[in-house]
Image (cartoon, rainbow, N blue to C red):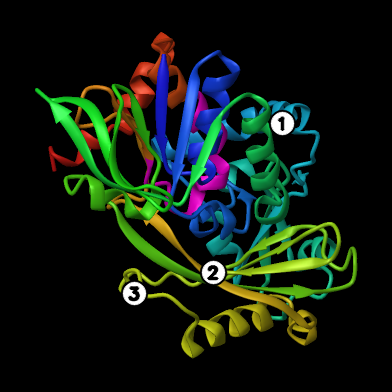
Amino acid sequence: MAVLILGGGLMGLAIAHRLAVRGTTVRVLSRRRSEAAGFKAAGMLAPHAEGLSGDLLQLGQRSLELVPAWVAAIEADSGLTCGLRPCGIVVPFATAAERDLYPTAAWGEALDRQGLERELPGIGPGWEAGLLFRQDGQIDNRRQLMRALQRACVEQGVHLQEGVDVLELLQDGGRLSGVRVRDAAVGIHVLQANTAVLCSGAWGAQLLPELPIFPVKGQMVSLQGPRDALNRVIFGPGTYLVPREDGLLVVGATSEREAGFSEGLTPFGQRQLQAGLEALLPAASQWPPMERWWGFRPCTPDEAPLLGPGPLDGLYLATGHHRNGVLLAAITAELVGDCVIGTVQPQDEQCLKAFNWRRFAAT
């Protein structure tokens, strides 16, 4: 069996690795891997801190449980570390009443002001209560995970092809028959394929307009602080602070639904990040900036992913993860990989139904 992966970001590589480990021949087509959301995100593993609910919370919790073994397999195949850090995440609130109404409060440890100061030395004065989710954490996707996953794929025999723009999905009687591509090396041509996985993130609707996927732009900045100045992630309203082990602090992220695919930083977005930083951890506003960047989250109307069989026989979907792509990569690789090779477990059928692209057709 040979499978085309359309998109070389986090989802594409995660699924490619799972398929290759199980003996499948895999080819990954990528226009520019550097534009993938996996290189832009902060790397939070935060189903509880995000306040998820319903099927999406359950999916996130399952993925969180899979992450340690998933990371261990990638590290074993690549010989590189992924930067997994089970540091816990604190969500601060202005009042205890707000804290107690949070959707996932039952999974967290309630904090008063004294508890907040203990867990987050230097936290801003506007926060009187919090929730500590010890089970949530982070992974250094930007600097470590993506590099390790790419190496792991290569070691498992995955063929990675960059500079390839997928122009069209070809079909024969409702079944995928190939893709028309523009290759930077050989120009426009057709690749025959009976099985493919669409992992092209925010750009998915350009190939399949029936998919309700749209970009949500996010701007971010990183600062260099003292090592161990902050040991837990702070998940504030509109801004989060993610401390790496070497003292780098990732500050994110704007959520610009009207920006489309407009590239570049904006003064308004950068001021928003600065204001959020000053409110959460005032001292960090004086730390030197290291890098500023932006990216495009692939979003759906209910902010949950599209997983499993797609509109064409032989085409599978792994896109639309919005804010939770890094968290959901492990479970996405398992569920979609199993779909492709036909080994879906009975208990996963209902899960795949909940995230099938057709759920929007009934609304």
Instruction: Name the disc covering residue 253, or none.
Output: 2
Query: Taking 267 as reference, is 122 above or below it?
Result: above
**Residue found 62% across the figure and 84% down from its top:** 274
Residue 10: where, in percent of width, then height?
A: 54, 44
Q: Residues within 10 Å of mark 2 (few under 14, many from 20)?
A: many
**Mark 1 against mark 3, which lies toward the viewer?**
3
Q: Which mark is residue 259?
A: 3
Badge 3 element: loop
Q: Mark 3 packing: few (<14 Cα in 10 Å), some, or many (20+)? A: few
Residue sitting at 12 percent across and 37 percent down?
362
Residue 324 left/right relative to 225: left
Earlier-in-chain disc, 2 versus 3: 2
Q: Within the image, what quadrant is residue 75 found in?
A: top right
Residue 40: x percent and y percent?
Answer: 56, 60
Closer to the camera, 285 or 18?
A: 18
Q: Which residue is mark 1?
A: 68
Q: Position of residue 195 (x, y in %)?
A: 33, 23
The amino acid pointed to by label 2 is: Ala
Cα distance, mark 2 to mark 3? 14 Å
Classify the position of the N terminus by image quarter: top left
Label 2 element class: loop
**For the magenta stretch, what is the residue range?**
319-334
Which amino acid type corresponds to the residue marked 3 in the rendered image?
Ala
The first of marks 1 and 3 along the sequence is: 1
Secondary-structure class at tag 1: helix
